[in-house]
Amino acid sequence: MGDPDLPTPPKIIQAMIQAVQDPENHHYPSYSGMEGFKAAIAEWYKERFSVRLDPETEVISLIGAKEGIAHIPLAFINPDDLALIPTPAYPVYNVGTLFAGGKPYFLPLLKENDFLPDLASIPDEVAKKAKMIWLNYPNNPTTAVADRDFFESVVEFAHKYNVMVCHDLTYSEIAFDEYKPMSLLEIEGARDICIEFHSLSKSFNMTGWRIGLAVGNKEAISGLSSIKSNVDSGLFQAIQVAGIEALTASRESILEIKKIYARRRDTMVEGLRDSSFKVDPPKATFYLWVPVPHPYKSIDLATRLLTEAGVVVTPGNGFGSPGEGYIRLALTQDESRLSEAIERIKSIKL
């Protein structure tokens, strides 16, 4: 699973402990988020991506990024509206669309296209009916990354067809070898059509805390806020205080976390190559997207690794049919455990 085994940094925990003891944080919070937390988000975006945001109208707190991703279709998708959804992908993009009564139009992510959707292949009649398009770079599960040229083509496409772009940027801080993922909002014109989702879960090992955010187009933020004000009561203020600590004084913790994942990545890539797998080291995320050797299918290899080696991997087709032929491995165990997994895999002589 994409659940870090590493603990939340101590300073963030201490900020939470102090905030929990403050009675002012025991009441219902703001639906959209504390002013201080939203200001910290805006400041972090300015320093990290050179993107300036209005904390009042272009930022909203989320009970984890998943919550916002699932809810935004309820604000903008009417029954039978189309949403353009990549596959393989995080399942919530599709599920949120279905819950809103919309219809998915799937965009295959293929190796020959560097696991980027081929926008030119979308029929004109489909593009004209689409209300939103989902993107996620750095990508789960393929680990693919997107460059400025691709993002510019997305913004051009969205303006041409009046499509909202929903970009999941959750993995932007888990990147290696001097690579720095960019925000879609860095592209000129993106603010007119884009909402971007982020989370403290992966960057600061806070998956269980349920703290996320969305930024971007103010109409999109307002629509999401309208849904949230009717289905939840906002994010616990003490957690938001911890989030302020993470985004300000504890940013340096990300550097050590990245180093740990980089070592794990290198351990697994080297070991898998020694086991006759052809795998490239990812530039970002804490996953490996590994082609399965001939003549296996994804589920067959995953089953054999489980039953004969005691190693759990995710079949690629579980994220969508174009994921057939791959398995996903997560780097969310320590190096000794990962090395043990490699030895177990070698023992069954694929």
Image: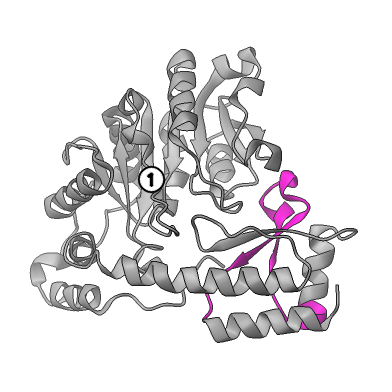
List x then y, in percent, for residue 234: 27, 54
Question: Is 328 positioned to the left or the right of 40 in the image?
Answer: right
Q: Quadrant of the C terminus?
A: bottom right
Is residue 99 shown to the viewer in this render?
A: yes
List x then y, in percent, for residue 80: 59, 25
Please name the residue that numbered disc 1 is placed on.
197
Q: Residues within 10 Å of mark 1 (few under 14, many from 20)?
A: many
Quarter of the rendering containing residue 128: top right
Identity of the amino acid at label 1?
A: Phe
Question: Is 282 positioned to the left or the right of 226 in the image?
Answer: right
Q: Please tell me which residue lies in front, 194 or 235.
A: 194
Rendered residue at 30%/35% (across/down): 216
List x then y, in percent, for residue 267: 58, 75
Quarter of the rendering containing residue 9: bottom left
Q: Please tell me which residue lies in front, 28 or 164.
A: 164
Rendered residue at 78%/80% (across/down): 346
* 210 vs 91: above or below: below
List x then y, in percent, for residue 29: 19, 56
Whether residue 217 appears in magenta in the rendering, the answer is no
Q: Please tell me which residue lies in front, 348 or 1.
A: 348
Q: Quadrant of the N terminus?
A: bottom right
* 162 vs 341: above or below: above
| Bounds of the magenta segment | 306-334
Whether residue 317 appears in magenta in the rendering, the answer is yes
